[in-house]
Image: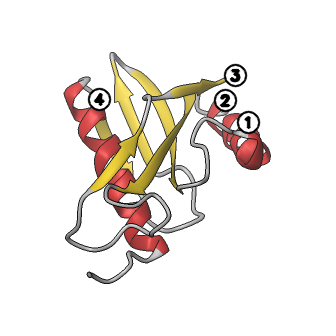
Amino acid sequence: MGRKLTEQELHNLAMNIVGKQLEQEGYDFLAVNSKLKKNPQFVCTKEKKMSFIVVKSIEYPGDPKDMEFFKADLHKMRDHAEKFEARTFYAAVGLVNAKDHNLPVYLNEDYVVDYDGLVEIK
């Protein structure tokens, strides 16, 4: 059995998943921040419109669709983004051990991703 991923490693994994999606959708990266609890993770532009994107990794049994826990951070980020006429998005990436949902995600072992894409914070 491998080593359990740290909180920072889970965060980096989630950022890689979201970053690939942003690239595929044609976003240009202005800034990338991978520090835990430092928002936003991505500042991007697409079609000359700026976006701030907050990425969170959520380990099972957490629910990536439950934004209640992050609501205050997200609204603070939205208020900051408005000063730049930017949109704010939340990208919650659920991660779970593929073999046993009750075990953590381990280095170099299979995992399942629960990610529905960007959610705009209005």
Amino acid under disc 3: Lys
Per the image, the residue denoted by label 1 is: 79
Label 4 secondary element: loop
Disc 2 vs disc 3: Cβ atoms closer than 8 Å? no
Q: How far apart are marks 4 and 2 (CA)?
A: 19 Å
How packed is label 4: few (under 14 Cα within 10 Å), some, or many (20 or more)? Answer: many
Lower sequence index among marks 4 and 2: 4
Q: Is residue 122 visible?
A: yes
Label 1 secondary element: helix
Q: Which of 107 and 7 is in front in this view?
A: 107
Q: Distance between the residues labelled 3 and 1?
A: 10 Å
Per the image, the residue denoted by label 2 is: 82
Per the image, the residue denoted by label 3 is: 122
Amino acid under disc 4: Tyr
Find residue 117 and report its horizontal and vertical position in percent. 43, 29
Amino acid under disc 1: Asp
Per the image, the residue denoted by label 4 is: 27
Q: How far apart are marks 1 and 4 (CA)?
A: 22 Å
Label 3 secondary element: loop
Mark nearer the viewer, 2 or 3: 3
Mark nearer the viewer, 4 or 2: 4
